[in-house]
Image (cartoon, grey):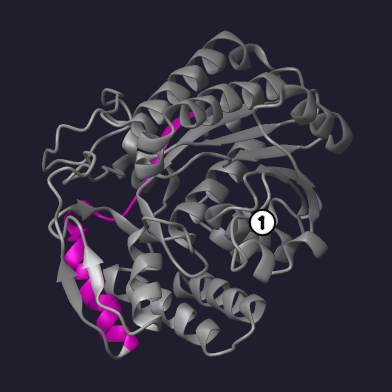
Amino acid sequence: MGNLVADLEAFRGKRVLITGHTGFKGSWLSLWLHLHGAEVFGFALPPEGESAHFSALQLAERIDHTVGDIRNVAQLASVFDRVQPEAVFHLAAQALVRRSYRDPIETFSTNVTGSLNVLECVRHSDSVKALVFVTSDKCYLNQERQAGYSEDDKLGGHDPYSASKAAAELAFATYNASFFATKSNFGAASVRAGNVIGGGDWSEDRIIPDCIRALRANDAIVLRKPQATRPWQHVLEPLSGYVTIGAGLLQNPSKVNGSWNFGPPENAVHTVHEVAEKCVEHWGSGSIEIQSNPNDPHEASLLQLNCEKAHAQLGWSPRWGFDRTLQETVSWYRSVVGGANVFNTTQQQIKEYEESGQ
């Protein structure tokens, strides 16, 4: 481990099932593994919006694409039976905090019940050798402290999204101890990343898409909580960690079983306002307005991860700092808005990321 390209190549020719492949992180991961020769199979809801990264990449024509809902266990089980995956990356989720306040039942049913269905399908599969179970940095009981959260810190959540991710982690831990521990030639790990940004994200209520929409329209960027800090990282950073874990599970599962954080250095957290300022800087124009509303639902003001375990045991570390991350992110949007081919732009950034660690 520690050699990213070698870890990516560990999936060449292998059947890899990715839940949530139509989402932001899922589309980047699907393309990345496809470029390294994996047989990628995706199972997810249809992509959201006409500009979805998945659609723009034409991934439905490049990988095996199945539309479905992880809450439907029969549908999910039929995909496992057909695909006979050797590795599973579980990314499917309702991933938006503010949406979780509007629809907590959908959030819990997707993130908890849907995740249980994935765990159950893996449990009964004879083909799966590796499960990478993706949750979130928000699974930790956030006390808004300066120190980053480690893998053995207490789980919890103030908002429905965070609580659903903590519950998913508890379900994973239960299955890992009760069922997976006795499963031969198999390994499973849960992975927790920070606030992921990068090209291709057009979601509602996320800082980068909100900034880009405002900049394209020559409107001011409106910030609700400008001083909130997050562990910002380019989408390829945690995905590189997931790939490293997945390759490790295939090769030596006992070394990487368990839970792992993949975030930026603890001293590299930045405010929402700093992110918006960098977007304006790299776009070349724009303005920022503050419109705080005391009636807005609660969102954490301070959150960061301690990733010492991944550094020490996997040789994993972030490749792009805050400035490079924002530069690459805004560059992707500027290129695509200007008419550049999405597939070529995304592939080129993947190539640059791989080369930046050499």
Query: Where is residue 107 shown, x and y percent of the image?
Result: 47, 32
**Residue 79, above or below 32:** above
Q: Which residues are magenta?
A: 257-283
Residue in view at x 72 percent, y 23 percent:
73
Query: Where is residue 68 shown, x and y percent of the image?
Result: 73, 39
**Residue 87, above or below 262:** above
**Residue 132, above or below 63:** above
Q: Secondary structure at mark 1?
A: helix
Q: Nearer the viewer, residue 323 or 203?
A: 203
On the picture, is 16 further left or further right than 302?
right
Residue in view at x 75 percent, y 30 percent:
76
Residue in view at x 57 percent, y 42 percent:
91
- Location of mark 1 (residue): 30
Q: Nearer the viewer, residue 68 or 275?
A: 68
Three-letter amino acid code at the position of disc 1: Ser
Image quarter of residue 57 = bottom right
